[in-house]
Amino acid sequence: DWTMAGYRQQAIDAIRAQVGDSHVICGLSGGVDSSVTAILLHEAIGDQLTCVFVDHGLLRLNEAEEVVKMFRDHYNIKLIHADESDLFLGALEGVSDPEVKRKTIGRLFIDVFQKYANDIKDAEFLAQGTLYPDVIESVSFSGGPSVTIKSHHNVGGLPEKMGLKLVEPLRELFKDEVRALGHELGLPASFIGRHPFPGPGLAIRCPGEITREKLEILRKADAVYIDQIRKHGLYDDIWQAFVAILPVRTVGVMGDGRTYDYACALRAVTSVDGMTADYYPFSHEFLGETATRIINEVKGINRVTYDITSKPPGTIEWE
Ligand code: XMP
């Protein structure tokens, strides 16, 4: 695609002109936007870029390893893997209120990011994967709903606080254009097409108290579910799919024994922008097979339910 190739070169020239000899910090989440931002910056300024990947211990199975492998080993980008799971999980101990969870994670995220960023010498810029719709939304925000349903991760105001200037190479692009640019930059299709994943991570898929035990069970169940969806060729038809572990144990029977384990809920929705969503109409065959696999393969779960709530009135995430 000659247009995207042209855009790529133009964006690289603009970054070089803006940054000069200074150093740039980029928060990397592993999502498409921050990934494309990091790779583009790396092409433009190489070692003048340092990425900070905050690992809050609420990521999916093998997710942290995959991000580190891709960006540090494959792309050769300077990457700090801030493994702060003890800090986050410690602060979340005994917390079951969804808003307290979100605010605790948001606050610590900023603290941790700042701590690591302060150690990066000569940093003058902060790179963000802001897209065009984000730019418009923040302008028209006062016209938006006045009720806060969920407080999202918000790092707005961080650059000023840290005395950094912003680099936002994607601010003219829509999501599909970011994906095309990612493709142009050689980002694997499996990364580009990934379902959205919320900043607070698995915390909001674990209603009630978060424990390491529950997180481990959740990670395994989620991996089996996503594997099923990929094997049946359904991944790209779905906006988002995940497992939530429920704060309830139920009685079951396995072999010749009684079990008393957690119940979980499968979630899968179609959506255009995440604002409204419909539950995905899986076949009963698929659901039955998936339930059997999860119960057989994941120790700690003995009951599987399918969430058929659309948005509204439900939200996509459980918290
Ligand atoms: P809800 O659950 O509000 O989610 O229907 C709509 C979309 O937003 C994602 N989501 C978040 N993304 N930080 C994020 O970056 C957050 O705090 C957050 N909460 C929800 C959710 O995964 C869905 O795609």
Image (cartoon, rainbow, N blue to C red):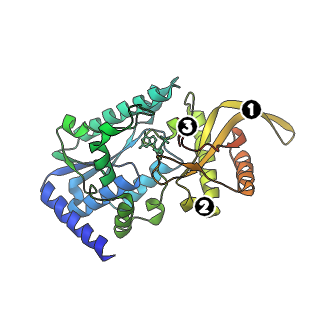
- Callout 2: CB less than 8 Å from ligand 1: no
Name the secondary structure under disc 1: strand
Mark 3 Cα within 10 Å, few/some/many (few <14, many 20+)? some
Vertical side of 95 occupied by 294: above or below: below
Residue drawn at x 65%, y 41% as measured from the top left: 265
**Amino acid type, residue under disc 2 in the picture:** Leu
Q: Position of residue 266 (x, y in %)?
A: 63, 45
Q: Name the residue under label 2.
A: 234
Residue occupied by mark 3: 318
Residue at (15, 55) in percent of width and height: 19
Which comes before the other along the chain, label 3 or label 1?
1
Amino acid type at circle 1 is: Thr
From the Cβ of disc 1, is ligand 1 less than 8 Å away? no
| Percent position of residue 16, x then y | 16, 60
Residue mark closest to the camera, 1 vs 2: 2
Between the residue at mark 3 and the residue at mark 2, the CA separation in whole angstroms equals: 22 Å
Classify residue 183 by image quadrant.
Answer: bottom left
In terms of secondary structure, where does tag 3 sit?
loop
Q: How far apart are marks 3 and 1 (CA)?
A: 20 Å
Question: How many numbered marks have been drawn onto this rendered protein structure?
Answer: 3
